[in-house]
Image (spheres, coloured by chain):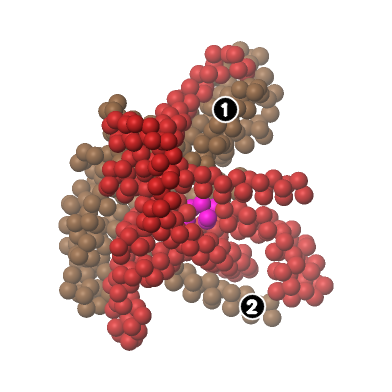
Amino acid sequence: MRNRWNIKVEVLGILLAILWLLPFYLMFVNSFKSKKEIFLDTTSPPEAWSFDNYITAFQELDFLRTLFNSLLITVVSVVLIVLFSAMAAYALSRAKSKMSTFLFFLFVSAMLIPFQSVMIPLVTVFGQFDMLNRGGLIFMYIGFGASLSIFLYHGALNNVPKSLDEAAKIDGANRWQVFWHIIFPILKPITVTVAILNIIWIWNDYLLPSLVINTTGSETIPLKMFFFFGEYTKQWHLALAGLTLAIIPVIIFYFFAQRSIIKGVSDGAIK
Amino acid sequence: MRTRELSYWLFLAPVLLALGLVVVVPMVLGLFYSFTAWNGIQTGEFVGFQNYINLFTDERFLDSLWFTTKFSVVSVILINFIGLSLALIVTSKIKTSSLLRTTFFMPNLIGGLILGFIWQFIFLKVFASVGEAVGMESLQAWLSTTETGFWGLVILMSWQMAGYIMVIYIAYLEGLPNELIEAAEIDGASTIQRFRYIIFPLVAPAFTVSMFLTLSNTFKLYDQNLSLTAGGPYNSTEMVAMEIFKTAFVQNAFAYAQAKAIIFFLIVAVIALVQVYINKRREVEM
């Protein structure tokens, strides 16, 4: 009885999983077809696995450069968010005072503000100071990413005993040494969560880069994809090859880090 | 560490600077500009509440607000229903459990913009060709009407977010005490009874978290809206975030767009505060 029920559940699960993958299958098989072949048939595998579409998409997307831009912006932003947020959360959790409570409250309430509510003044102010470039973008990511990251670090730090700090201090370590050599390594599990949440968000972000980056050659993948798609909107064979290219780095990342990714996302949502 | 120490402020300096310049200053400026005739360059004259008065008779804005609300309500229900079902499937005693989790969660890692483009292909091309093959008129011309645009967005978001919500439900389901469920099983409770009287009450907190997470995500939706329908046909599937964007950067009505952005903020903040209130009340009860 028990067993038969489980088999039914398993079959249902597998059928749903196939349904879930169907969009990716359709994107993939059609990305190898010619324009005419897509017109005739969208569901079967291509007659021949030709890479012509990929060669065009690769060149048009300036793929290596675009990939590099995305990597550069994501890595630098995430490293700085992790470091600065951990530092700030450490200060706020160790100095219990009205000031700390107020600042923590400030960071948490900043999470309530949707991007669209600050978008217009943000762009005009940064524009006046000539900061609409990759450096400005990374700075903005720190501002938008700090709140949630500080919140997560703050929660984790409450479980790190203060006696640890004091012991190190007696041994002659200064504040920075205590933080860097003792506290930060202990925070590693939450650092993984913070890093993953910020990587997913920054890597996929479209709106902010679209407002900040306006020079050819510094576009990130979503930004370049938007222009590319606009140009090839009636040529699905090229557009689909481009979309597949854009997804490949994410799939590789997911393949190697899926356990941490799912755990990180779940922790980030529940805490 | 003490607040008076220099090191306290040095540890906080980078994030305070970034948050201040990126969030606090624009928010304060934005609030101020929403009461003026600001055009992006010059502040212009002070107009009091005029921008806010105007937006209550702005049909395009009100339509987008109504469309967003409808979309959010339908999506929240569907995403949570599908997400919970998926979670129940993958937490039962099956062999493919972790493979299924990986699959259902996958769309969340890919940006909304790219997912929207993929689904645009499916709705426009695949639906049409399948519809032709099986003779279903209703699969033709998707995304060309308000209704198909609406359901297109709902399908896209349900497919994308159900796996995310699944992960949250899994966390609560796996935290359930096994003895309790087994005890009920021995006492002869059916699968449905076990779900109704034991699992459901214990995962209730997951509902609050998931509901509000989906609500705030769907209400603020922009990327998927842009790539799937771009607001068309005739702006009828335009959601609030996109409407604000177009008011600012297409019509160049900066101050007016900012007033809309403030209203948008108030709505999102109220949703979030209601959640905080409900969570606090539950903690007190427990």
Quadrant of the image for the C terminus of chain A? top right
The image shows residue A24 at horizontal and vertical percentages of: 36, 65
Task: Kindly identify the amino acid type of the residue bearing the numbered disc 1.
Answer: Leu
The image shows residue A220 at horizontal and vertical percentages of: 29, 44
Task: Kindly identify the amino acid type of the residue bearing the numbered disc 2.
Answer: Trp
- The mark found on residue A246 in the picture is none
CA separation in Å, label 2 and label 1:
53 Å
A100 w.r.t. A141: above or below: above
Same chain? Circles 2 and 1:
yes
**Res. A96 image quadrant:** top right
Query: Which stretch is magenta?
Result: B213-218
Q: Nearer the viewer, residue B35 or A202?
A: B35
The image shows residue A92 at horizontal and vertical percentages of: 60, 26
Point 39% across, 70% down: residue: B147
Subunit under mark 2: A
- The residue to which callout 2 is attached is A5
B236 w.r.t. B253: above or below: below
Numbered disc 2: secondary structure: helix
Type of secondary structure dominating the magenta stretch: helix
Residue B122 is inside the magenta segment: no
**Res. B31 image quadrant:** top left
Point 65% across, 23% down: residue: A98
Colour chain B appears in = red
Q: Which chain is brown?
A: A
B241 w.r.t. B67: above or below: above
Q: Nearer the viewer, residue A188 or B43?
A: B43
- The residue to which callout 1 is attached is A103
Subunit under mark 1: A
Q: Is residue B197 visible?
A: yes
